[in-house]
Amino acid sequence: MSAAEEARTAPPSSEAVIFSFAPIVARTAPAVVNIYARKVIRTQSPTGELDGFAFWRLFRDTLLFGYGRERFENSLGSGVIVEPDGLIVTNHHVIRSAEGIVVALADGRTFPGQVVLSDKRTDIAVLRIFTRGDPLPMIRFGDSDDLRIGDLVVAIGNPFGIGQTVTTGIVSALARTTVGIADFRFFIQTDAAINPGNSGGALLSIKGELVGINTAIHSRSGGSQGLGFAVPSNMVRTVVDSAVRGRPLLRPWVGLSAAPMPPVLANLIGLPPQSALIATIVYPGGPADRAGLKVGDIILSINDFPVPDFQSLRYRIATQTVGDTIVLRVLGGGAMKALEITLAPPPDVPARNDTWLPNLNPFSGALVASLSPALAEEFGLDSALSGLVVLEVQSGSSAARAGLREGDIIRAFNGRQIRTVEEIVDVRLPRFTRWKMLIIRAGSTMFIGKG
């Protein structure tokens, strides 16, 4: 047990429970801001996809009229000042498609906001306001990996536009990877009361450090039901660092794909269920391949962090930067190994070559591109895969009738592996000819075909 874990003790008496978050709030609340974004919206329903039991993005619509036609909408969210010169973190979905952004400080001042970097895959955006040199209050980043289930946390934001609120709760789960909110699914779950308008607000440790950005809730009504999710600060920091450097967000690449280890195999080798991954694809010439990882190796940890599922592995890699060295602890060839892997930028090979398949092709009406690791990272796909990615399918086209959908990855056709657009663009099939195509759809491998 570490010294930090030993320091976590239960209150010895009822008197010891009497404490206050007031010092933390006084120090941090001035650095939590309100964000107003003006957007153009076309919708058919006041709640749309948010009806029923769903994940609610935590912004608050303030103009709810004009459904079925283009209209302007003012949305409200929260943000956190992380640098005294006016650098602010919020959620991508708060400012997405905004035609104008206004940032309101806790002291009543307002400033126009400028988007520095916005990343859909993490649902994090970085804004900047210009205060003519006046330093602003800020909140320092904490290490989200220091959190433990049961730790107290504080959420600050502006729900429902009623003004700044402070709520507390405990961390009820870490590394929640089954929540389909963003591409990098690795969330802190808390029961602190957060509601629409809290999106982009601060989740604080009891040290007053920023450990997460509140992003969504799981609710039937849109109100808080004790299931709130926040992007961990260690992920947020990678986006902020790119914004500070003034560079596009470049995610590191390791060149491997993995699947959970079957429980039967785990039992045979004496490992707990859901405790390791099996390497299923090792990209030839990639960082993992150069380090000696083999297909079939059992991955136990990355930098001493467990990897019970592939989302956890992706998260741990995404919080690194290009050029960093990670250590994979693997079991392969009957021996335990520690592989040092230097992360690289994803290569843009083969060239994507966006192409509409021609009319004589049995899949005409599909826009496809050769899948490279760089393109896979751009679209949030498995960057160890090769094949074609379907970018668009025209309604009623031959491709649509054949069963292709946007986002499908074409891996093989009639038993022949497909790696580039050129390998399928000239395909011609006589009428009534049988065919079979191997695709990956939403992470599942399947066949579509005729005959």
Image (spheres, helix red, strand yellow):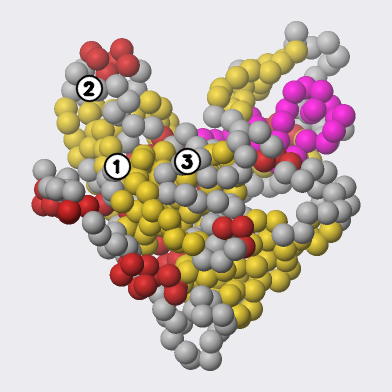
Quadrant position of residue 62:
bottom right
The 10 Å Cα crowd at callout 2, few under 14, some 14 to 19, many 20 or more, is some
Q: Earlier in the sequence, mark 1 or mark 3?
A: 1
Which of the numbered marks, if any, corresponds to residue 149?
1
Quadrant position of residue 315:
top left
Residue 19: x and y, percent? 25, 59
| Residue that numbered label 3 is attached to | 227
Q: What span is colored magenta in the figure?
A: 381-410
Residue 440: x and y, percent? 59, 27
The kind of residue tagged 2 is Leu
Marks 1 and 3, how far apart at CA: 14 Å
Residue 141 appears left or right of 36: left
**Front-most of residues 142 and 7:** 7
The 10 Å Cα crowd at callout 3, few under 14, some 14 to 19, many 20 or more, is some
| Residue that numbered label 2 is attached to | 271
Q: Are marks 2 and 1 in contact (CB under 8 Å)?
A: no
**Outermost residue toward the front?**
15
Residue 239 shows up from this direction: no
Which of the two marks, 3 or 2, is nearer to us in this view?
A: 3
Q: Residue at x 22, y 22 (%)?
A: 271
**Is 383 covered by the magenta stretch?**
yes
**Front-most of residues 180 and 62:** 62
